[in-house]
Amino acid sequence: MWQEMIVALIVAAALLHFSTKYLPVAWRRRIVYTLGKRGFNETRLARFFKTQGGGGCGDDGDGGCSSCGSCDTTPTKTNASSGAAHQRVIKLHVQR
């Protein structure tokens, strides 16, 4: 009897891990939406299932939109060129 209960817990944990990692994002969002309608905390579920929180600004728990970056200032030349300074050149020597 105990062995069957332990196996059931292991299978349930494996199913939960599979559903949080390998299901398509649309299915995970649907699970979060459905469980949110049933009274669960939608923000925690979205974080657990690795989906975005509700689709609007302020849904990430911090009071602001952090996913799209549209609220940020436009990049200047100094910001754009600073990434190029850190690139490393790899030289390939072909032996024939």
Image (cartoon, rainbow, N blue to C red):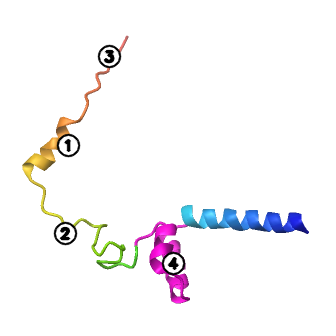
Front tag of 3 and 2: 2
Say what amino acid the circle numbered 3 marks: His
Vertical position of residue 93 compared to residue 34: above or below: above
Give the mark nearer the N terminus: 3 vs 1: 1
Residue 27 percent across, percent down from the top left: 53, 74
Residue 60 visible, this angle: yes
* In this picture, residue 43 sits left or right of residue 65: right
Q: Bin the neighbour count of mark 3 within 10 Å (Cα to Cα): few under 14, some 14-19, many 20 and up.
A: few
Region in magenta:
23-52
Residue hosting label 1:
83
Quadrant of the rendering where the C terminus is positioned = top left
- Relative to 94, residue 1 above or below: below
Q: Main secondary structure of the magenta part?
A: helix
Amino acid type, mark 4 = Val
Counting labels gives 4
How far is mark 1 from mark 4, CA to CA?
Answer: 37 Å
**Closer to the camera in the image, 74 or 42:** 42
Gap in Å between the C-alphas at discs 3 and 2? Answer: 46 Å
